[in-house]
Image: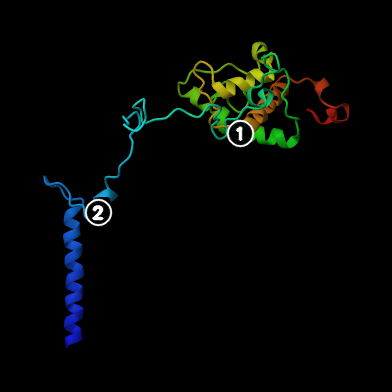
Amino acid sequence: MKISKAIGLFIAIVSLSGIISGCFRGEPSDKPPIDIVRDMDDQPKYQPQGESKFFADGASMRPAVPGTVAHGKLIDDPLFFQGLDSSGNFVAVSPVPVTPELLSRGRERFDIYCSPCHSRLGDGRGVVVERGYNPPPSFHTDRIREFRDGEFFNVITHGVRTMPAYGPQIKPADRWAIVSYIRALQRSQNATINDIPEELRGRVR
C-alpha cells in the first residue's frame, strides 16, 4: 500500500511540474518570464555594428588582418578563376581540356542553371521566357558566336543586364564545362555536312 502511495505521489509531482513549467513558456503574460539560469538566455555578446569599450576605436567589429583571404576565395590563377590572360584580356580558348566527360558535366549544369532562360538549344526560348521573362540573345547569332571563351565565363560569373550572377552557385570548373558545352551547342546548330566525318555521312538523312 505504501508503495502505491509513493508511486502516486511521484506521478502527481511530475505532472504538477509539467503544468507549472508550461505556464512559464509560450503563454501570453504581461509579467517578465521567470529565468532560473538567466545567462542561458541573455548572454553577453557584441552585436554587429555595436559599440565596444574594449577597443580604442570604440567599434566591436574588427577589420580583417591584412592579407586575409576568405575560404574558397583565393584567386591564384586568373586564367582559370577569371578567364583572363596575363594582359587582363578575356582568353579566346578555355584553359580546361575538352573531353566527353567535361561536355557531359557541362550539359548537366547547363540544363540546370541555363536552360530555363536560354532553352536546351541555346536559342533564348526557355520556359521562363514563355512566361514573360525578357528573352536572352540566342547563342547562335553571329555576335554571340564571336564571344571569347573567357567572356562567356565572365558573364556566367558576374551576370549581365537582367541575367543574375551564377558565380556563387556554380564553381569555376563547372563554369568552364558550361562554356565548352555552349560551344558544342553552337557547332551543332550551325553544322554542315562537311562537319561530319566522311565515313559517317551516309547515316545522315
Of 22 and 41, the residue lying toward us: 41
At which x and y percent is residue 18? 20, 63
**Residue type at numbered disc 1:** Arg
Tell me the distance, in whole angstroms, between the alpha carbons under discs 1 and 2. 51 Å
Instruction: Residue under label 1, please give it.
Output: 109
Residue projecting furthest to the left: 30
* Label located before the other in sequence (1 or 2): 2
Q: Is residue 174 left or right of residue 1?
A: right
Q: Position of residue 15 (x, y in %)?
A: 19, 68
Q: Quadrant of residue 95?
A: top right
**Label number found at residue 188:** none
Give the residue type at disc 2.
Val
Residue at x 32%, y 31% (from the top left corner): 52
- Determine which residue is flagged by label 2: 37
Q: Are marks 1 and 2 in contact (CB under 8 Å)?
A: no
Q: Quadrant of the N terminus?
A: bottom left
Measuring 46% from the left and 24% from the top, which residue is drawn there? 131
In the rendered structure, the answer to whether residue 153 lies left or right of residue 116 reads right
Helix, strand, or loop for circle 2?
Answer: loop
Residue placed at 55% from the left, 21% from the top?
158
Q: Is residue 153 above or below residue 33?
A: above
Quarter of the figure with residue 19: bottom left
